[in-house]
């Protein structure tokens, strides 16, 4: 079994993508590299995959570390403009799985591009499906998660093909349904903590920085959430 880090990227986002805040490609690329450098210190990842769904050439990033492999594609650009950025992430994940011959038991830790997630080791240390689920397990925080390739192929991608932000079929709801289907079929699930992150939001452009009080609240909330979930 191998463990991979998978980072989503959307460097060249158009102004007409629903629920997306326009940030110039130069700024987005700089944020992507900044977030990537944070994870490069972790040598436990066998490979690091970065997929850009806007067709922007990010191949120069491969020079930062021998483990990095980048992918860029543009097939989904028009659909993303109509169906939202969640659909773009779905297509990025589909593209990654189609491009690589990964073993079903290999494990992927997925992280949003341009994010620094300080508690990511809560996800990278596990080999099972691990998401932070909220709202009665109906909403999945997809900024970071861990999952075997088998889950991504046969549950996540199958569930997310109908994503349409404008119709209320948002990515986070569909991913949560995929997790519930996985559990219903007997798959093991670990409730992950909320991501303790710093980043500039791609939705509204707000910048969040490291906050010690917020970090404490995340740990506190997760401790009791796990107690309730495993009762």
Image: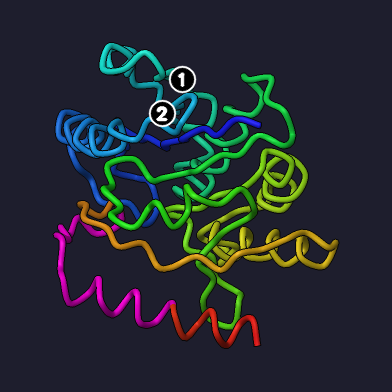
Badge 1: residue crowd in 10 Å (few <14, some 14–19, many ≥20): many
Identify the residue under disc 1: 71
Identify the residue under disc 2: 52
**Residue 100 sits inside the magenta stretch:** no
Q: How is the image coloured?
A: rainbow
Looking at the image, residue 64 lies above or below residue 34: above
Residue at image position (64%, 81%) is 230
Depth check: give the residue in front, 26 or 197.
197
SS at badge 1: strand
Labelled disc at residue 219: none
Residue at image position (72%, 53%) is 159
The image quarter in which residue 148 lies: top right
The image quarter in which residue 173 lies: bottom right
SS at badge 2: strand
In the rendered image, which quarter contains the N terminus? top right
The span picked out in magenta is 203-222
- Distance Cα–Cα, label 2 vs label 1: 6 Å
């Amino acid at each position: 079994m191998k463990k991979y880090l998978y980072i989503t990227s959307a460097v060249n986002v158009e102004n007409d993508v629903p629920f997306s805040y326009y940030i110039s490609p130069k700024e987005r690329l700089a944020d992507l590299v900044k977030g990537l450098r944070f994870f490069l210190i972790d040598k436990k990842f066998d490979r690091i995959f970065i997929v850009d769904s806007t067709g922007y050439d990010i191949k120069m990033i491969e020079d930062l570390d021998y483990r990095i492999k980048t992918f860029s594609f543009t097939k989904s650009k028009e659909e993303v403009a109509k169906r939202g950025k969640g659909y773009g992430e779905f297509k990025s994940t589909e593209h990654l799985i189609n491009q690589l011959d990964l073993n079903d038991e290999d494990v992927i830790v997925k992280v949003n591009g341009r994010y620094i997630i300080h508690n990511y080791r809560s996800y990278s240390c596990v080999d099972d499906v691990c998401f932070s689920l909220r709202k009665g397990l109906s909403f999945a925080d997809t900024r970071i998660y861990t999952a075997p390739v088998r889950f991504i192929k046969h549950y996540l991608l199958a569930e997310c093909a109908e994503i349409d932000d404008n119709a209320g079929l948002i990515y986070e709801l569909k991913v949560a349904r995929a997790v519930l289907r996985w559990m219903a079929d007997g798959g093991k699930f670990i409730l992950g903590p909320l991501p303790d992150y710093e980043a500039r939001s791609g939705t509204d452009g707000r910048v969040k920085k490291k906050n010690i009080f917020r970090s404490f609240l995340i740990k506190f909330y997760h401790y009791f959430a796990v107690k309730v979930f495993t009762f």
